[in-house]
Image (tube, grey):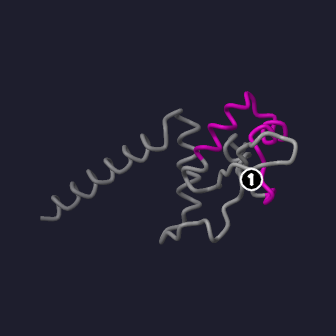
């Protein structure tokens, strides 16, 4: 199975604890335009799968770098966050819809299923 661009980026960032900027990621993965890398990194960061941080480098302008999320950065959740985040990332890639749109629709469908199931039990 071919990895999505988002998963390629995520896997690359996991291998570079020193952090990579969007230009580095674009060069290393071949994903173009670079703005696509930026958008995917923003999605990964909003899902708390990576951390984005502005970094000063000697002789260069300040840039945003992408870092793996370590145990101190991660918010503890009672479910296996990796699985549902991968499914969500795959749905975003497949449909072109935002994570928030997909999550909202999924919650509405789940609520309807729960409410319908409870009303049938009575």
Q: Residue furthest right?
A: 59
Q: In this view, does 62 lie to the left or right of 107?
A: right
Residue at the extreme front: 59
Name the quarter where the N terminus is drawn: top right
Taking the magenta stretch, the answer to whether it contains residue 21 is yes
Relative depth, front residue between 59 and 8:
59
Q: Is mark 1 on a helix, strand or loop?
A: helix
Residue 30, above or below 89: above
Give how far across and how far down residue 74 sits, in percent: 59, 66
Vertical arrangement, residue 50 with respect to residue 38, above or below: below
Give residue 34's quadrant in the image: top right
The residue furthest top is: 33
User: Residue at image x 53%, y 48%?
Assistant: 88
Mark 1, residues whose alpha carbon is within 10 Å: few (<14), some, or many (≥20)? Answer: few
Label 1: which residue? 11
Q: Is the magenta stretch mostly helix, strand or loop?
A: helix
Name the spot of residue 73 as percent of width and height, x first: 61, 65
Establish if 35 lies above or below 69: above
Query: In the figure, is residue 78 to the left or right of 17?
Result: left
Q: Residue at x 49, y 38 (%)?
A: 98
- Counting from the top left corner in percent of width and height, residue 56 is at 77, 49
How many numbered circles does the render carry?
1
Task: Name the side, left or right, on which 41 lies relative to 108.
Answer: right
Q: Which of 26 and 55 is in front in this view?
A: 55
Return the x and y of residue 72 as percentages of the image width and height. 63, 71
Query: Which range is magenta?
Result: 15-43
Q: Quick one: quadrant of the C terminus?
A: bottom left
Q: Is residue 13 covered in magenta?
A: no
């Amino acid at each position: 199975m071919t990895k999505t661009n988002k998963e390629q980026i995520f896997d690359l960032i996991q291998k570079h604890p020193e952090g990579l900027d969007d230009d580095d990621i674009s060069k290393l993965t071949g994903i173009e335009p670079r703005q696509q890398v930026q958008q995917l990194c923003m999605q990964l960061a909003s899902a708390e799968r990576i951390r984005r941080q502005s970094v000063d480098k000697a002789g260069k302008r300040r840039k945003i770098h992408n870092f793996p999320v370590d145990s101190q950065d991660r918010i503890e959740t009672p479910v296996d966050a990796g699985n549902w985040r991968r499914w969500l990332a795959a749905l975003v890639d497949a449909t072109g819809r935002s994570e928030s749109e997909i999550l909202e629709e999924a919650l509405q469908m789940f609520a309807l299923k729960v409410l319908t199931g409870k009303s049938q039990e009575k």
